[in-house]
Image: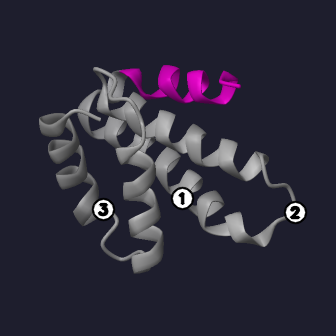
Amino acid sequence: MAGEQLTQLLAWVAPRAAAAPEALRRRVVEHIEQTTALPDPAATLAAAGRRALERVALHPGDRSVALDLLAADGLITLALLHRAEHAPATLAAFARELQGAS
């Protein structure tokens, strides 16, 4: 992810993830950092969530990816929250897009 965009997105995420366990916060950040930045930060968070979920799908039944499953949930939640805070009129359509994403 590009420097300035990453810094801004992580600054937005930090206070919203502050209450999460440290290991989960680190994993969320790792998935964000490994995701290609999109023009829309909410879409970037959603892409990071899908990336985390893909990791889980590659290891079915393996408890070692439990943290990735939690990170995926958190990232999708953060994506929806970002959209709600920055473009609330598009939240419903964005949520439908996420539901339909494979």
Instruction: Give whichever of discs 3 and 1 has the lower sequence position.
Output: 3
Number of numbered labels in the structure image: 3
Q: Where is mark 3, residue-wise?
A: 16
Q: Quadrant of the C terminus?
A: top right
Q: Where is mark 2, residue-wise?
A: 61
Asked whether disc 2 touches disc 3, contact meaning CB atoms under 8 Å apart, the reply is no
Q: Position of residue 89 (x, y in %)?
A: 35, 22
Q: With 90 as the anchor, is 100 left or right in this view?
A: right
Name the dominant secondary structure of the magenta segment: helix
- Decide which of 21, 87 is in the foreground and name it: 21
Q: Please, what is the three-letter code of the amino acid marked with disc 3? A: Arg
Kindly report the distance in space between the C-alpha atoms of the residues bearing marks 3 and 1. Answer: 13 Å
Q: Residues within 10 Å of mark 2 (few under 14, many from 20)?
A: few
Q: Specify the segment rendered in magenta.
A: 90-102
Instruction: Give whichever of discs 2 and 3 has the lower sequence position.
Output: 3
39 relative to 56, above or below: above
Q: Where is mark 1, residue-wise?
A: 71
Q: Position of residue 3 (x, y in %)?
A: 16, 38
Regarding mark 1 in the picture, which secondary structure is present there?
Answer: helix
Q: Please, what is the three-letter code of the amino acid marked with disc 1? A: Ala
Kindly report the distance in space between the C-alpha atoms of the residues bearing marks 1 and 2. Answer: 17 Å
Q: Is residue 101 magenta?
A: yes
Regarding mark 2 in the picture, which secondary structure is present there?
Answer: loop
Query: In the image, which is nearer the foreground, mark 1 or mark 2?
Result: 2
Q: Position of residue 11 (x, y in %)?
A: 17, 54
43 relative to 69, above or below: above
Q: With 78 as the anchor, is 60 left or right in this view?
A: right
Q: Is residue 54 magenta?
A: no
Q: Position of residue 98 (x, y in %)?
A: 59, 29
26 relative to 12, above or below: below
Q: Give the residue drawn at x 39%, y 67%.
A: 26
What number is the disc on residue 79? none
